[in-house]
Amino acid sequence: MSTLNITISPADDLIDVPRRIVVTGAQPGELVQVVSRTVRAGVVWRSSARFVADAAGHVDLTLAPAAEGDYEGISAMGLLWSQAPEQPGKRELFHADVQQALTTVLEASSAAGKAEAELTQRLCADGVTRQEVREQGLVGTLFLPAGPGPHPAVMILNGSGGGINEPRAALYASHGYAAFALAYFKAPGLSDYISNTPLEYFEKGLDWLRATVKPLGDFVAISGQSRGGELVLLLGATFPQKVSAVLAYVPSALVHSGQNACDPAIGREGPTWLLDGKPLTHQWENNRHASWAPFDEGTPPHRHVLAMLTALQDKEAVAKARILVEHIDAPVLLLSATDDGSWPSSIYSKMVRDKLDEVAHPHAVEWHDYQDAGHAILFPYVPTTQISYAHPVSKRISTGGGVPAANAHADKHSLQHALEFLRNAVGAHLARSAQPSRKEVS
């Protein structure tokens, strides 16, 4: 009869909550193997590691380094972020229904026997509601926190993969925000491509969100990743009175062309964003140094960032394509990665931070640059092993960069910073709103 036992605390909670995983009942000094198995969108993901039991016959993953296996060193949640899919090429981490929990089975085994336990991760807290939005030409999903509100609001925008970012919206709602995941291409009723997207569409989204949820203190933040990170900076600069805070994940400081998400009939050097029906100048336009060759002809896995770096050599073209972030009238959070394989988000974030410093931006500016991490900064305790992939639109295979452990660190700490940033931004916004105007004072 097995003497092994495995406990998980808490066993069932939100996805970003760390767990304590402890195996007991082993012989002191013996090797204990722990295997994880999670079904994600119909695909099995696995990881395993071996640990040396302590003098009491215990293995506490918050204290015990992995002696061998799919990750190294001490990581309480290493058996989750080091998972890889059994079917190569699969990258989907969540069920299509984000209200469905992810269940991981952990199995411990040693000479003392075997034991199993389940770990449940949720994107939706109890009481969070989901509503599809198909009105006024908008396509998205609204998640509302439990309770009557009013709640501060966040509009979430995806990157060059398009679609509706329901996982991040669900998690924001679980932390108390009315969260509107707005699609702008590659979703029902919308274009399959990013090319020629009007910025007025997002302005309509901001207006709809305000009118629908009547947010606390009229606070509406915008959060975006990759092309969405470029977009939220652009929206903050274009519609400053409608944006209360900007969260830019691996963003660009410049307007970019259609690139990998372009309409093939327009081409990757064609425009992405329109304003008043006119295309915005982008960094590839009349650029004397820009070349796709380092990306197209480079050694696999191809690094898109290498082409982006050629474009930065033309300072005049860069200046014309720069997003005028000094027009933003809100706090700004920048999250970047030093080994970003998609584009130089560290360089871009520094450009934004430096410009805001130069103009003495009157709101908080935070920049977190994650060493050795890549382009895919998500949120805590999800697999980070699938670094090379086929782009969802162009199907070109490239690498997002980074290494799994560094990516896992960025995932964990970026959400902590994002939630703290939002709390502070809401507080500052409400404090400003409570101050009497000059007219009232006089």
Image: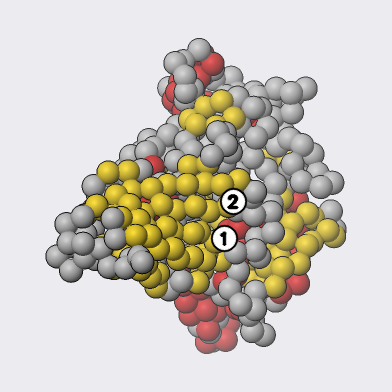
Question: Which residue is under mark 1?
Answer: 102
Question: How many dots with numbers?
Answer: 2
Say which amino acid is labelled 1: Leu
Quadrant containing the N terminus is bottom left
Task: Identify the amino acid type marked 2.
Answer: Arg
Which residue occupies the foreground of this view, 230 or 70? 70
- The residue lying toward the viewer, choosing from 12 and 233, is 12
Residue 219 percent coordinates (x, y): 59, 71
Indicate the secondary structure of the residue bearing disc 1.
strand
Residue drawn at (85%, 60%), measured in percent from left and top?
Answer: 135
Q: Which residue occupies 76% across, 67% down?
A: 131
- Horizontal relation, residue 218 to residue 314: left or right: right
Q: Earlier in the sequence, mark 1 or mark 2?
A: 2
Q: Residue at x 44, y 59 (%)?
A: 106
Q: Height in image: 242 above or below 191?
A: below
Q: Residues within 10 Å of mark 2 (few under 14, many from 20)?
A: many
Q: Which residue is mark 2?
A: 40
Specify whether 299 is left or right of 152.
left
In the rendered image, the vertical position of residue 11 relative to residue 398, given as above or below: below
Residue 220 visible: no
Image height of 240 relative to 198, above or below:
below
Residue nearest the observer in this picture, 32 or 258: 32
